[in-house]
Amino acid sequence: MSFQRLARSVAAAGTPLCVGIDPHPGVVGTDAGAVLRFGRAVIAASAGRVPAVKPQFAFYEALGWQGMRVLATLCEESRDAGLIVVADAKRGDIGTTAAAYAGATLGPNAPFPADILTVSPFLGLDTLGPFVTAAREHDRAIYVLLRTSNAGSATFQDPAEEPLCAWLRDRSNIAGAVVGATHADAVVRLRARLPLCPFLLPGYGAQGGSAETARAAFIGASGAAAPALVVSARGATLPDQPSELWRDDPASWIAARIDLLRADLARAGIGS
């Protein structure tokens, strides 16, 4: 399964850091060529430094067909570079529509090829079936939204934790959970309920999540190691104010940022 491949990639990279490929228009712009150059710089900086990248689909969809063509290219080139691709699309629907969403990313001829897809369970657990089927058939996996990184997530997500946890416990070989690194208590509580479940931890860095908070996700039952990926997007790839180096050689700027984030995680006992 893809989580087994992900574990090997994490071990080879020596870190569980996942870098987001999020071309914020206020910094990168809205020209498809600029977005492609930015994405390629992220891939070049990430290859050999981290195990995975996470393109956020919304930024590409906002650019229309040109943006979607860029997204397809970046997914393919990321995988060619040896990176695990986490497609952050948060898909969720019923029946054949869910199957179509799954086929677009997890199928053998997917136009946006990914190894793992984020999915929403809030239409009902039955809607996850087509995604699980596609993942099993094609050596892929899914991350299910469990407690997202935004401040308002508790409004609807806390009441849903128990049925989702039960569902995830039975499918931890194919289905992981999105748990925001911005919610320290939730990370601890959910790891205790799901000691073997792979976690995706968005919100590290720019959103305020810390390495210390993320560390709790790596400690399972009786102190055993647990699987997780720690995501940094803006913090790894975008400056607060564009600098000359970022404009002239963004791959070098991003590589230096990745090295700083790796070191921050290592000081918390996450990776090396």
Image (cartoon, rainbow, N blue to C red):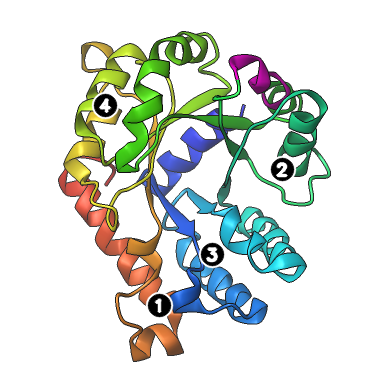
Question: Residue 43, which numbered label?
Answer: 3
Q: Which amino acid does label 3 sit on?
A: Ile
Which numbered mark, 4 or 3, is in the foreground of this view? Answer: 4
Which numbered mark, 1 or 4, is in the foreground of this view? Answer: 4
Magenta stretch: give its range.
124-131
Q: Which amino acid does label 2 sit on?
A: Thr
Residue in the picture at 29% in, 58% down? 206
- Name the N-terminal-most of marks 3 and 1: 3
Q: Is residue 125 magenta?
A: yes
Image position of 248 with respect to 178: above or below: below
Q: What residue type is labelled 4?
A: Ala
- Residue 62 located left or right of residue 201: right
Q: Which of the 4 image quadrants contains residue 192?
A: top left
Secondary structure under the numbered disc 2 in the rendered image = helix
Residue in the picture at 43% in, 87% down? 247
Q: What residue type is labelled 1?
A: Ser
Q: Does the magenta stretch include residue 151?
A: no
- Name the N-terminal-most of marks 4 and 3: 3
- Residue 176 located left or right of residue 35: left
Question: Residue 29, which numbered label?
Answer: none
Q: Which of the 4 image quadrants contains residue 271?
A: top left
Q: Where is residue 67 in the image (x, y as percent from the top left)?
A: 69, 67
Separation of residues labelled 2 and 1 (CA atoms): 30 Å
Secondary structure under the numbered disc 1 in the rendered image = helix
Q: Mark 4 points at which residue?
A: 186
- Residue 165 located left or right of residue 96: left
10 Å neighbourhood of mark 2: few (<14), some, or many (≥20)? many
